[in-house]
Amino acid sequence: MLGGWDGQQHESWTGRLADMAAVEAFAATRVSPGEGERLARVALRLRTRRSPIASVTLLDPIEAFPSRWRDVLDLLPVDIQTEAAPIGAGDLGRLQGTCLQAISQAHIPEGSTIEGDGSLIVLRALTREVAEHWLADHCRRNSMQSRLFVCEDQAASVDDTLCVQGLPTCGFDEPSALRPALQALPLALETLWEPVEPARVLEFLMHPIGPFHLTARRMLANAFARQPGIGGREWSKAREQVAQKLGSDVVDQVSYWLESARHARSTGAPLDDVIARVIKLQAALEMRLAGLRERESEAALQLDVKGALGQCSQLMEGLRELRKEGNANVRPRALEQLITHATVDSSNALAVAQVGCMQSASAPAACVVEPADEVIWWMPSRPQLPAPLPWVGEELQALVNAGLRMRDPAAEMAALMAHWTRPILAARQWLYLVLPPEGSEDHPAWQLLKAMCPDLVPQALQAHAAARGQIAAVEAHPLPVPRGRWQLDQDASWRETYPAPTRLQAQSFSSLNVLFSNPAIAVLKDAAGLQPAPTLAVSEGNYLLGKLAHRLLEILFAQEGALRWSKGQVDAWFEPATEDLLQREGLPLLAPGNAMLLQHFRDSARSSISVLLQHLRHARASRVQAERKLQGDIFGLDTSGDTDLLIFLEGGGTAALDLKWSPAVRYRESMEAGDYLQLALYAHMSEQELAAAPVAIGFFSFVDSTLLTFTPNLFDASARVVTSSIKPEQLVRSAVDTWNWRVDQWQAGNVEVIAEGLLPPATDPPAGCLPLRPLGNWWGDFAALFGEPEDA
């Protein structure tokens, strides 16, 4: 079309040319006109109407323009810009003369000499960040009104650095589909699909812009992160809180967006459903925009929301077009493509040129407008080179015979090379060419400069800055070495308020384990009250599998007579119960890509439940309480905890089991070594609460369906009976001794900091105390406050 084609079939056209004409005949009324067609209409109007345009100055030769543009320019008063002359002196002036000679003669002349007078400087930095900070320092030290900054790529990053250095920004804007308001539409439509993508649901709930109240979405997001499902206990609690705080209308919106029927990704969603959701989102965005108009300080967000409304409108057009073509459904991939096409480039409303900023250009071709005393050409990026013509020789001849003037890639390349010389020709006194870091692809403009000036060698930016006094040595000040022990102020007024290194009213196994094994973490967490910043993330991995397995047993033992169920009854119950639980609390296992993990969970849970019931029947269990809360004290120290399974036996007596989603061998070794304080505390609290110690305690592993216990002949023969020389009551006494030892340290103002490489090393526990145990990685947030070891 740009070459002058009228869209009609020509008699001599066959093959691909005939196909192109047939496609154009079909699409002419269905596809918006392109640049060539619009220019043809402009030329037609110019022939019949008077134009108010007084003159058009051409900065490029007329031959560089496509045929349709030439048709338009022929109808206008055109002024051809005369050939420029060098405006610099010294090295810069000689290079400008060589560039002009290369443009006029269409070949590279003999190279000009470089004397190093400082008018032409080529720099290469180690990193972009180093170069950006050099630029900020250069601008601060050499303030001038006439400076032109040319940057084609990652210019917004340069503006960010100028901003943090207290310099005026140029207002470079990089359009991006990642503007927050433009994410609302794809996230809202993600709620259509089954299976659910849990991470996308959490993003939908946490996003600042959405189709219903932000407070409601945040409340649901917290519940979803704790229990990743829709309809489970945490979700239901959050839903009730939304109803109480925000009303039933918001609950209805929650139901519409997240609890209504979803559609299979393989078959797609009905177009009417998709359109209805887009309309609802549009209404929410319009309400948001109306509220923002009343606040002048939210001008930037207003632009974002307007962009999102435009995105919705464009998508609606695409969906209606699909409906006209007879489509009833739209699949996820097609919908993603429609959203991509509908996503307008949203500008950054915060990217503004500030008072006192440099002249700037985002393309070398724009540098012809106005010269400057100093030009900084910033890291030329890889250009878009002219593409070869898609036609073979016979096809090209047929197009020429039809009257078309096809573009010439060689002429386009020559014009592009002329554009690359414009930043050089725009400099009056100094030209700085800052190259990207080593390893980046060289821009053809730099290759052209090296061909014209073989003596031109880039300097290391650091060496250039050091020679001009822009780099100063910073005296080394070693950081204080973290110590393996903190000494507290013994005269501090708070010491009497906290006689123990904790604020907890009752101790659990977890809190005692931290205090015993690393008092510094207990002090930071329980005494100082420090908490890691909350980060919402969907539970996954073994942690999620263990939680779901616990919940399955909790649901099972809530059924009447479950202890006496046959294998067939268990199997009949298992599938629907598991499916319902996964929907309510375990959506990550149903997400695409998790089929193997889901099958592993189903197989392990089904097998383990059958084995566990067999053990319980053999032990003549009469009832089972899951997640049974226990309370007690050890020599005046209040304790609490939840035992996973408290089993009541016929004829009296109980047993306590802790459920694990890990191989049983790990816990067998701990039991043999006497490292089972958690079970010992359960036994102690059970004895205090029920007036009798459990007849058995142990672990049950879902991974390998293994029950570990100290008590022989109680459970089925497949149970592994473990022998240990350390009894539960000994562990409890050792826990008391260890507590007293750590409290004595605290009262003396000492807090042990236990980490590899810290000095002094950890103190060996006194006789009768529990040995030190390494804590898991989940305490790393607190350990990060310790610093680096002395030998680091």
Image: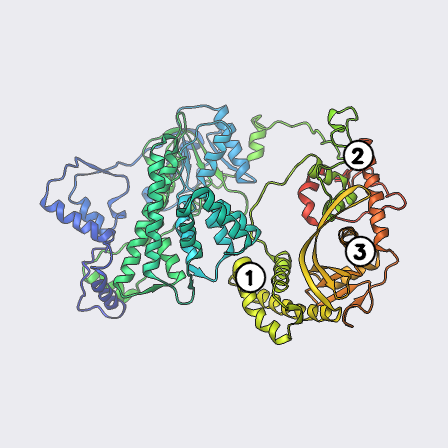
Instruction: Give the quadrant of the N terminus.
Output: bottom left
Type of amino acid at the residue the image marks with label 2: Trp
Residue 262, given in percent of the width and then of the height, sits at: 42, 61
The structure's colour scheme is: rainbow
Where residue 393 sits, quadrant-wise, is: bottom left
**CA separation, marks 1 and 2?**
46 Å
CB atoms of marks 1 and 2 within 8 Å:
no
CB atoms of marks 2 and 3 within 8 Å:
no
Type of amino acid at the residue the image marks with label 1: Leu
Q: Secondary structure at mark 3?
A: loop
Q: Earlier in the sequence, mark 1 or mark 2?
A: 1
Q: Earlier in the sequence, mark 1 or mark 3?
A: 1
Residue 149, given in percent of the width and then of the height, sits at: 42, 33
Tell me what residue is drawn at x 68 percent, y 62 percent.
Answer: 624
Query: Residue beneath label 1, please?
Result: 581
Type of amino acid at the residue the image marks with label 3: Ala
Query: Residue beneath label 3, please?
Result: 692
Closer to us: 375 or 505: 505
Instruction: Give the quadrant of the C terminus.
Output: top right
Q: Secondary structure at mark 1?
A: helix
Closer to us: 184 or 176: 184
Query: What number is the disc on residue 746?
Result: 2
